[in-house]
Image: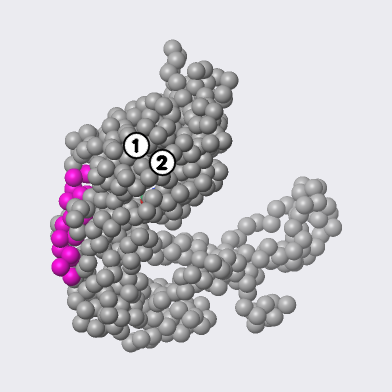
Amino acid sequence: MLNNQGRPTAAGAAGAQSHPTFTGNRALMIEEALLFEIGRADVTGVDLDEPEGIAFSSEVGTGSREENASGKRAFKHRLGGLERKGAIGLVGLSEPETMRHYVRLSQKNYGIDTGLFPLGSCTMKHNPRLNEKMARLPGFADVHPLQPQSTVQGALELVDELARWLLALTGTEAVAMSPKAGAHGELAGMMAIKAAIEARGEAETRRVVLVPESAHGTNPATAALIGFVVKPVPARADGTVHVEDVRALLGPDVAAIMLTNPNTCGIFEPQVVEIAAAMHAAGGYFYCDGANFNAIVGKARPGDLGIDAMHINLHKTFSTPHGGGGPGAGPVVLSARLAPFAPLPFLRRTETGLELVEDRAAAGESRPFGRVTAFHGQMGMFVRALAYMLSHGADGMRQASEDAVLNANYIRAGLQDLMSVPFPDHPSMHEALFDDAWLKDTGVTTLDFAKAMIDEGYHPMTMYFPLVVHGAMLIEPTESESRAALDLFIMALRDLALRAKRGETERFAGAPFHAPRRRLDETRAARAPVLRWTPPEPVRDAAE
Ligand SMILES: *Cc1c(COP(=O)(O)O)cnc(C)c1O
């Protein structure tokens, strides 16, 4: 196999199955080498005039010129002796070559704009293009965090209006807008709880945080990071948390519980109100992981359920698909008991407009625990979230939640005669959870099944999470998938499920057959990533 630069690639193997190609490309699926493999360091893609009075030494690598004594002096003078001594080592490529490389890379990214993206516990949500248009308005896109506040009053109004929507939808007292992701919001919310406990003089005694076994890993990590002792709440066979199990753990040492609702098994916690009351009666706080808010927006207000703090992943619930590292935003709403401890900065309305309160001295009655980010949060995400809310309106957001729940249950109903459902007694909220009991004795695993989905053109669902469900497959279609799209997805999964049951193990063990790469060593990729390119030996020798 050769790539388009004529060098052998290991990767051509996938295409080699049936009709090997000279280039290693398969139709318009182009083998993309690294920039360093495509280009060479001793050529350049640009043609710049040599600046007057400057001579480059041949080592610079941009073309050798005769050395010129006076020019060299001028060069030194201008760069203060910091001129490059060795070769820069970057490849020289023309603009079209560079452009193609990055455009092709971007096309290898599967996202919600390319197809159904069934990851659960993530809400890979359609992001209306209107949001993008709004976020790119120069008045929002180009604001600088150090600009005088008088010049960004419109942007501050937007943040304030979004905050009011978040308070209305959650039924809470205050919101810290600055956290930059869900996990960051968790941290801010738990730090507010810690500050409240310190203010009560109970910092030494209340050190335990209860976390159900089904929780997202960020929950125990957050609690542990700020010095709490994490105690697991055991999982019940029906996938929910029972108030008796919480009560059994309560005492003067318990600071808070971190509960996800709807939970990571896709179930609305039936005893959430009782759990909140039990926590409060025992002097503790109720932190709610709000990552699954998409299922209940406009239907239930977490404040009414008794929560004290909840982060909202704007990038899950209020559009903007995430992944690949960002950007997100994780505002955290707070009950009246925690509101005084909200972090800096926060907005205050004065006679002349909105003002960002940036330090404790200016905080008045409030007792902010500190700050969690350098500036004020993710402006672009705020604009998208508010654009989403305003274009949907209250009724539209409620309908989005209803449709998300309907779609998840439609998928569950379409598959549950073939694939086993671990918690059949509870209806699904916005995501449908299956386990691998139905794969027993087929020789096919959850991972194999997911790889076969790639061949069918689907990003796999969330696998092996929540941990309390064996071989979990967590599918969240969101509200924006049409019935036709759901039907096709269901038929594709039914076809695979029937093949697994018929014992067609090869279809699975070797999958994916049609992807650019086959089975990767995912553990090694995560644990020992190759982050630096080193020239292959023969090439290095030739250059010397
Ligand atoms: C996504 C998620 C988080 C973390 O949110 P990020 O924005 O990714 O930091 C926490 N808990 C649950 C249940 C989640 O699904």
Quadrant housing residue 384: top left
Q: Compare marks 2 and 1 and give the one earlier in the sequence.
A: 2
Tell me which residue sits at (56%, 24%) in the image: 360
Tell me which residue sits at (67%, 77%) in the image: 540
Name the spot of residue 95 as percent of width and height, x first. 50, 61
Q: Secondary structure at mark 1?
A: helix
Mark number displayed over residue 250 = 2
What is the quadrant of the C terminus in the image?
Answer: bottom right
Mark number displayed over residue 431 = none
Q: Is residue 394 above or below residue 55?
A: above
Task: Identify residue type, mark 2.
Answer: Leu
**Is 76 on the left-hand or right-hand side of 201?**
right
According to the picture, the residue beneath numbered tag 1 turns out to be 278
Quadrant housing residue 457: bottom left
* Mark 2 vs 1: CB contact within 8 A: yes
**Is 411 on the left-hand or right-hand side of 466?**
left
Tell me which residue sits at (77%, 52%) in the image: 82
Color theme of the render: one colour
Q: Residue 265 versus residue 205: which sits nearer the camera?
A: 205
Name the spot of residue 459 as percent of width and height, x first. 32, 64
Using the numbered discs, state the Cα–Cα distance from disc 2 to disc 1 in whole angstroms.
Answer: 8 Å
Circle 2 crowding by C-alpha within 10 Å: few under 14, some 14–19, many from 20: many
Of helix, strand and loop, which mostly describes the magenta segment? Answer: helix
Q: Is residue 515 above or below residue 460?
A: below
Magenta region, residue range: 400-418
Name the spot of residue 415 as percent of width and height, x first. 18, 65
Tell me which residue sits at (35%, 60%) in the image: 468
Q: Is residue 104 above or below residue 202?
A: below
Q: Is residue 308 above or below residue 52?
A: above
Task: Identify residue type, mark 1.
Answer: Ala
